[in-house]
Amino acid sequence: MSSHGDKGEVNGYRRLDLAARAAWLYYEKSKTQDQIAAELGVSRQVVQRLIALAQSERLIRFQLVHPMSECIELAERLMDRFSLQYCDVAMNEFGNIEDIPAVGLHAALYLETVLQQKAPLTIAIGNGKAMREVSRRLQPINRPQHKCVSLMGNLTRDGRASHYDVVTWLSERIGAQCFPLPMPVVTHSIDEREVLQAQPGYRNLKALVGEASLLMMGIGYWGPEASLYMDGFITAAETGQAMECGAIGELLGTAIDANGRVVDADYHPRLTSFALTSPAERPTVIVGSGTNRAAAITAALAAKLANGLITDENTARRILDGV
């Protein structure tokens, strides 16, 4: 006999099914809300609520198939400026400081293309808001032969996890093997970091990162509200000290200056994330949105820490205008 909770869950799934069908009829089949109401046997007001539910639950994904010439031109200019292997620029509204949903969708479409191959592959993934959006935007597929490995940890020094456990979400989305890095982003001491990195599990993850055919990560700007500080991975004092050393951005937890060089931050010897090579030897893509991140993106690309970029129009223009 089903419990009351089970019945509620079934009803919840049934409502999502109806929402998906209503949205499909409305957007794909161009039917009016009155026509949909008649087909589903509900009122027009219910149809409106179902379509709104489909939007809020991200059951609908908008994809513009007509290429925007301005975005293409911006991408080509960025590729020429930084000798990139890949660049994609998403549309966004004028005046937007950032547009992570739009950039996340473009990055998801790029990643879906990569994941279509049947031969086993390994992808290495960073954390953060942009990468979380990518994992949410991916269409579910089944690729048990693929491996997803995290490029950085997800814990604070006191053991608290952040909300950006991207590698787990992404692996679930595509049915891939999941290899998280279960350790603090920054440890209490150098000795603690060395002990953690001496474990067999870490060495296995390092080997997987070494064989990855794609590296994809977000990028942070540096300031009093730097992501590493706001997420509890470093202290206010460590944030300020890195800023005094010239930090303007952060890539996989590593603070960089305006030339893309690693600054002499006090916390760096205790950082557990995997370091990037310069110049990048494999497809290494930054997913970054926000005019406040333009300087950090410019620095990382100029230093050849990455050879791919997925961003938005406003950020692209800021980069090309010299920040």
Image: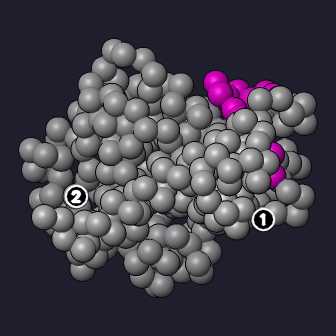
**Residue 228: percent from left, percent from top:** 47, 70
Quadrant in the picture for the N terminus: bottom left
Q: Amino acid at mark 1?
A: Ile
Exactly how many numbered labels are in the figure? 2
Density class for disc 1 (Cα within 10 Å; few <14, some 14-19, many ≥20) is some
Residue pictured at 53% horizontal, 25% vertical: 113
Q: What is the magenta range?
A: 76-92
Work out whether mark 1 precedes mark 2 in sequence or the reverse, and give the earlier one: 1
**Does the segment drawn in magenta span residue 86?**
yes
Density class for disc 2 (Cα within 10 Å; few <14, some 14-19, many ≥20) is some
* Residue 295 makes an appearance in the image: no
Q: Which residue is mark 1?
A: 97
Q: Which residue is mark 2?
A: 182
**Residue 178: percent from left, percent from top:** 26, 42
Residue 167 as seen in the image, left or right of residue 65: left
**Residue 10: percent from left, percent from top:** 33, 60
Give the quadrant of residue 110. Answer: top right
SS under mark 1: loop
